[in-house]
Image (cartoon, rainbow, N blue to C red):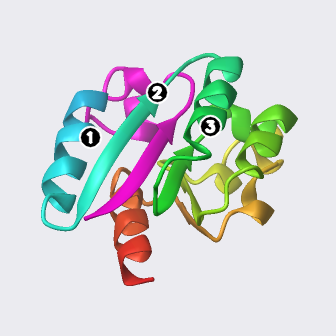
Amino acid sequence: MRKIVIINGPNLNFLGKREISKYGTTTYQELVSELEEHAKKTNDLVFFQSNHEGEICDYIQKIINEKIDGVIVNPGAYTHTSVSLRDSLLLLSVPIIEVHISDIKERESFRKTNLINDICEKSFIGHGVNGYKMGIDYLNEK
């Protein structure tokens, strides 16, 4: 089984409860369950979510030497602001897949800055929670 780490940033723990018109009704726990079901025959999924930039960077540093096959990251708002998250992701030697539930390119102007896109092998943006499944499938096809 291929091991994929899925990292979610701030406010993603409130999926299904905030800005439903942008993020849908699927809760974070429902997302985790859906992804586990989607990948149960092919992957060991590990989930991490934090609202704190330093905790996310610490977690990435923690997994550097673990045997993993890829990382899927939805940094939330840190996509647009966090150089430290970018630098932490650069420490990884596995494929990094970027996911955003909403289409950040079609939102507020401050969301057009993307500090991680160029270091990610692939991005799935604006596909709703299915973007995570697309990321898993992409990593499995490699």
The residue to which callout 3 is attached is 60
Question: Counting other residues with Cα less than 10 Å from the Cα at mark 1, is it few (<14), some (14-19), or many (20 or more)?
Answer: some
At 13% from the left edge and 53% from the top edge, which residue is drawn? Answer: 37
Query: Total number of numbered labels?
Result: 3
Q: Quadrant of the C terminus?
A: bottom left
The mark closer to the camera, 3 or 2, is 3
Does the stretch in magenta take in 116?
no
At 20% from the left edge and 35% from the top edge, which residue is drawn? Answer: 30
The residue to which callout 2 is attached is 49
At 46% from the left edge and 54% from the top edge, which residue is drawn? Answer: 67
Q: Is residue 36 visible?
A: yes
- Position in image of residue 42 (x %, y %): 21, 67
Element under disc 2: strand
Element under disc 1: helix
The CA span between labels 2 and 1 is: 12 Å
Q: Residue type at mark 3? A: Ile
- 136 lies above or below 115: below
The residue to which callout 1 is attached is 31
Does the stretch in magenta take in 7?
yes
- 74 lies above or below 28: below
- Position in image of residue 101 (x %, y %): 47, 48
Instruction: Point out the stretch of residues depicted in magenta.
Output: 1-27
Question: Counting other residues with Cα less than 10 Å from the Cα at mark 2, is it few (<14), some (14-19), or many (20 or more)?
Answer: many
Find out whether the residues at labels 3 and 1 contact each other: C-beta distance under 8 Å. Answer: no
